[in-house]
Amino acid sequence: MRRGGVVVGLIGAGAAAGWLVRKRAMDPGWFRGFVTHRFNPLVTRFGLAGGRISPWATLEHVGRVSGTVYRTPVLPKVAGDHAWIPLPYGADGQWLRNVRTAGHCRMQVHGTTYDLDEPALVDPDERPNLPAVLRRRLAERGDQYLRLHVLASQPGSLDTAPALDTAPALDTDPVATG
């Protein structure tokens, strides 16, 4: 009986892989959409980001126009008084626009909540403790990081720390226009 379930599971996985390959051939941006609309919600819903052993952190930010509080999984590195978040999809993500417009956000990493401000887009050359070979490769590809200043940190989760201000933001997006 178990073998039948394994075979059906493998056939289903093969069909899903075939669908992903066909989808990729038709739409080069499919992976970004998959991560944004399928993977990130699952990681957030099941609490996989921000935990003690998780590679992901949970970034809490406020929507530019709606004032809604969002939580997005990211892969940060906290070094000294800065947090560095790689931007694998470039500098046009909605969460990045929200953080840059608000000028601040919060992030939960390994059971610690950080209050962050002064968002800035920087090149890999400015990130400390990055091997020179990797720094050159990332610079050649045009990759960037979001650098955030650590304003404060405290043990605990985003749910136990004071919430971000949820007042509606500007009706325009100065990041997109400037």
Image (cartoon, grey):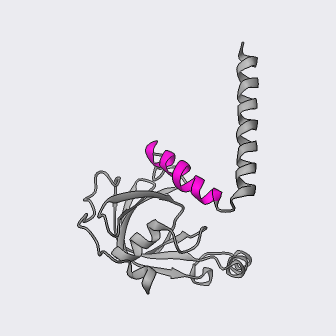
Where residue 143 appears, as percent x and y from the top left, is 63, 76
Q: Could you tell me which residue is drawn at 39 percent across and 70 percent down? A: 98
Q: Image quadrant of residue 126?
A: bottom right
Where residue 169 appears, as percent x and y from the top left, is 28, 72
Where residue 119 appears, as percent x and y from the top left, is 42, 78
Q: Which residues are magenta?
A: 30-46
The secondary structure making up most of the magenta span is helix
Left or right of 152? Residue 58 is right
Q: Quick one: 142 or 93, which is closer to the camera?
A: 93
Where residue 18 appears, as percent x and y from the top left, is 76, 43
Q: Quick one: 102 or 56, which is closer to the camera?
A: 102
The number of discs equals: 0
Q: Indicate whether 22 appears above or below 72.
A: above
Q: Could you tell me which residue is drawn at 36 percent across and 68 percent down? A: 105
Q: Could you tell me which residue is drawn at 46 percent across and 67 percent down? A: 94
Q: Is residue 42 magenta?
A: yes
Q: Indicate whether 36 appears above or below 89.
A: above
Left or right of 62? Residue 42 is right
Q: Quick one: 162 or 69, which is closer to the camera?
A: 69
Q: Residue furthest top?
A: 1
Q: Could you tell me which residue is drawn at 71 percent across and 80 percent down? A: 132
Q: Is residue 97 magenta?
A: no
Q: Which quadrant is home to the C terminus?
A: bottom left
Q: Indicate whether 46 appears above or below 164.
A: above
Q: Indicate whether 54 appears above or below 68.
A: above
Q: Which quadrant is home to the N terminus?
A: top right
Q: Residue furthest front?
A: 26
